[in-house]
Image (tube, rainbow, N blue to C red):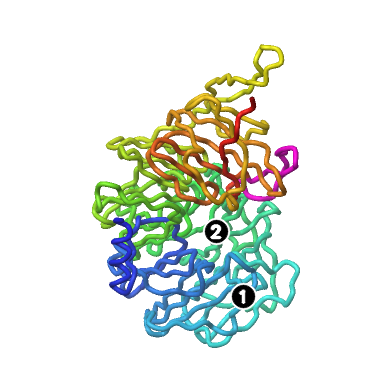
Amino acid sequence: MVFGLVSTALLASGSWQVLGPDGGDARSLAYDSHNPDHMLLGTSTGQLFVSNDAGHSWSRFARLGGDDYVLDHIAIDPQNPKHIYVSAWSVSSQQIGDVFRTRDGGKNWETLSAMHGKSIRAMAMFHGNSKVLVAGALDGVFRSMDGGDSWERMSPVNHADIKNIESIAVDPKDPNTVYAGTWHLAWKTADGGASWQQIKKGMIDDSDVFSVIVDHSNASVVFASACSGIYKSESAGNQFSKIQGIPFSARRTRVLKQDPTNENIVYAGTTEGLWKTSDLGKTWKRVSNPEIVVNDVLVDPRDSNNVLLATDRSGVMASNDGTQSWTTSNKGYAHRYVSALLADAKDGNTFYVGLVNDREFGGVFFTRDAGHTWLQRSAGLGGRDIFALKQAASGTLVAGTNRGMFALDRNATQWRSMNSVVTEQIVKAAKKGSKKAWVRSAGLPRPPRASTAARTRVNHGRAGRYWDRRILSRCGRRDPSWWPRHDPMRWFPMTLAQPGNNPGCLPIWSGSAAARLAPMAGSSSLRTKASIAVATAASDGSMSRTGCRARTSPRSASTHRTIGCWRRAVPPA
């Protein structure tokens, strides 16, 4: 009822409002050199955000391409900040991508026809002339000398190695000297593309080069990051040496960034936090939480103590004390995958949302002021993905996750597990000739797994209750009397052999709760006033007429299908 009222109000207003929760994945950052408080933020869904207060708050700015467009590089013309370029590639196809351009500060955007359809993975603007742009695509290196109106190929056509360009750097003093990092080592041209040489001395041969930067004060100093580590050259790429001091696990460095006012400070954004050197690479120190995955780094040209990070899951992180401490800076920036939404039964201003893909930075968030502010309530979930949220009459929240069921009592601060499983076994009675059976139970806390027993009897609820299988899409009437009463903290496997030709093995779990879990990806449910049953499809099962058989499946373990339910059958005499 509350959710319906909120939705109706938003629809009546003619437009939807972003409520949050703030944060999520952020891909790229850029600032206006004339006004560094003016910043742009690129996402992995074609959405561009803008900030006019140095990243303290954000608002939607432009939609570029489709939801599958990754906006990894933004270039704002330092001579005319109304000229902005954004490169994009698609996660759905290697034949989709663009370079976007605006000449009026973002009011109108155009795709540059010469680059349309190219998967643009890198882009750089020459420091000395903003009309010179170099772009790296999966099919080579391209350059524009006129601000994007026309483009020329710099790399040879169909070259066996100069392809799959992941990073681009232009010598700050010579536009004809270009470095291109590929999925296998790096290349360099010093004559505008007439000839190329592979630069790999000192590098491990099998190295994807994610980022290349050239020292803005000394072009002989070049840094390159690869899956095998970070490398430094003091001979313009002729010879590299691997940087020491960064653990191996953190060496997957997506971005390198030099302080614009202090050439001795270089940042390395890795999959295990941000690393910093203050002596041009001689020594390094991690200056962030190791759980942070850094996609881009922005350093304020007016005050290098102010640093922003574009991260996975945490959105924008900000430091104003030279990276000694960090806070999130996501007001107005919401880029999360919301998989569950629940309005509180007693408070119309309270909502709960469940998130996926955000690990310890996700889980469950709630608001008590109709979305103006959000707080995380995920202690005890262990970084699990949330697929469903429901509320019992007592106010207890129940969450269905990718690894079990959890409950949060009203006014509690930590979720508790609901995954204690009771194993059921059918044993023939000792009396000779009897067809009756009894159930022996043993409480065994373990992850829910499908049972292949032909018939299971549950010993909680009314006696003499047996169960067999029916197909959910063909169930027709779903009689609540089919479901028994159960202790909410004890769950019972009730999966039977699956008849017919329907694929997959479906474990079903039952237990009491005064709520109904709505159908979701991977599960469905039925309930009465005091009982609930959840059916979840397995992703790695095959079907036979005699039961379920496990097999290896290429399908993702997070992919589920709901194709089964249960009904009561007449117990044997």
| 198 with respect to 300 (left or right) | right
Determine the residue positioned at 34% across, 68% down.
16
Visible residue check, residue 560: no
The residue at which mark 2 appears reads as 223
Determine the residue positioned at 67% across, 62% down.
199
Coordinates of residue 443 in the picture (x, y in percent): 52, 22
| 560 with respect to 100 (left or right) | right
Any mark on residue 258, and which?
none
Determine the residue positioned at 66% across, 45% down.
504
257 magenta-colored: no
Question: With respect to residue 183, does 104 lie above or below?
Answer: below
Question: With respect to residue 548, does 85 lie above or below?
Answer: below
Tell me the crowding category of disc 2: few under 14, some 14 to 19, or many 20 or more residues within 10 angstroms, Cα based.
many
548 magenta-colored: yes
Q: Quadrant of the C terminus?
A: top right
Camera-side residue of 124 and 258: 124
Indicate the amino acid at tag 2. Answer: Phe
Coordinates of residue 135 in the picture (x, y in percent): 57, 74
The residue at which mark 1 appears reads as 118
Of callouts 2 and 1, the N-terminal one: 1
Coordinates of residue 92 in the picture (x, y in percent): 60, 66
Please report the bounds of the magenta region as a residue range: 539-557
Indicate the amino acid at tag 1. Answer: Lys
Camera-side residue of 93 and 75: 93
Question: How many numbered callouts?
Answer: 2
Q: Quadrant of the N terminus?
A: bottom left
Name which quarter of the figure residue 337 lies in: bottom left
